[in-house]
Image: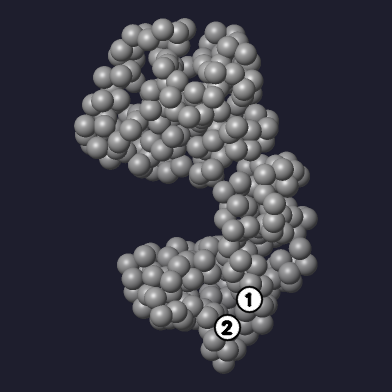
Amino acid sequence: MIQFEQLLKNTKVYKTIISDKNNGILSHCLMIVSEDEIACKNLCKLIARALLCKNNNCGYCKDCTEVENYVHPCLITLESLTADGIREFISKCYLEVEGDVKVALIENFHDIDKKEQNKLLKLLEEPGKDTIFVLGVTKSFAVLDTIKSRATKMYIEAFDKSELIQALKEEVVNGSIEEAVSFSEGSLTNAINILSNDKFIEYYNTIIDILINMENSRVMLDSFAKLNVKEKDRNQNKENAMLYLNVLEIIVKQTLEYLTNQKKDMNEKIEKISKKYNVATLVNIEECIINSRKKIELFCDVDGVMSALLMSILEVRYKCQ
């Protein structure tokens, strides 16, 4: 079975596609867009299954089983992102097959080089008979505008908290699901990543403590000591620092949502931070996070980047008071 199937069937994207299919108005090219990688990939496969199953996307018949295993005769998938892989995919799209419809599925379209994306333009303009394209995109900026213009773009909305909790309880056996969901921003991928990373909650509480108590440069130095990113492995240092930045970004977004009345059901720690940091400060901190992430990606000194980040937070806090 496809992971989180019922959660995905409840999305507006899925319901719209099924309605359009039943009414005979389905677009020949569907682009499913979301930064939520797990939801995007699984929804693309679920849509492909819905288009090829003759039993209302039952999940049990031969068609459904073959789609889930990527072996259905009417399902065309991209085997390789290379030039040869693209040529083979295009060639298969023009082959005649037995069936009412062919589904051309690319779950990670954003990973295709833009030069190779250009080769797909004609295919999308003049598709083979009864061919429907299902393209998964988690990095919209990596897709050519000419490709986007030839597709019907459909965006997966953030999941409701109660829906996510229920879905995770059905498929995940351990971990603090409610806590993970509260930090996930409605993203299935975020929630699963949090559940699989035992450092997340530790880092969250550390950063909350730092933000609440940061008053001057002396305290800032004490705070830096709490950010224990030191590992023998340089890559592990980078990974730890990136997790701190991701957690900090989540906290900043949560506080901004609280301050701008987008969400009022935040925990008491976010409420405490909202009394010490205004909207302007938080927006500036977001910019600091982006810059710090770029530096760490370039393998700059991790300790230096994190120390500079804390000093920047202290500076913008006083500047924006």
Residue 3 placement: quadrant: top right
Q: Is residue 25 visible?
A: yes
Is residue 84 found left or right of 319 in the rendered image? left
Residue 156 placement: quadrant: top right
Please tell me which residue is depicted at 59% across the width and 18% down the height of the picture: 61
Name above or below for residue 320 compared with residue 138: below
Q: Secondary structure at mark 1?
A: helix
Please tell me which residue is depicted at 33% across the width and 9% down the height of the picture: 96
Residue picked out by circle 2: 226
- Gap in angstroms between the C-alphas marked 1 and 2: 7 Å
Q: Amino acid at mark 1?
A: Thr
Q: Are marks 1 and 2 in contact (CB under 8 Å)?
A: yes
Q: Amino acid at mark 2?
A: Lys
Query: Looking at the image, what colour scheme do you see?
Result: one colour
Please tell me which residue is depicted at 21% across the width and 32% down the height of the picture: 84
Q: Position of residue 219 (x, y in %)?
A: 60, 89
Name above or below for residue 71 compared with residue 271: above
Count every numbered label the image shows and give the total. Answer: 2
Residue at the extreme bottom: 218
Q: Looking at the rendered structure, which numbered label has been put on residue 206?
A: 1
Q: Quadrant of the C terminus?
A: bottom right
Please tell me which residue is depicted at 26% across the width and 19% down the height of the picture: 91
Determine crowd level at label 1: few under 14, some 14-19, many 20+ residues with C-alpha closer than 10 A.
Answer: some
Q: Is residue 51 visible?
A: no
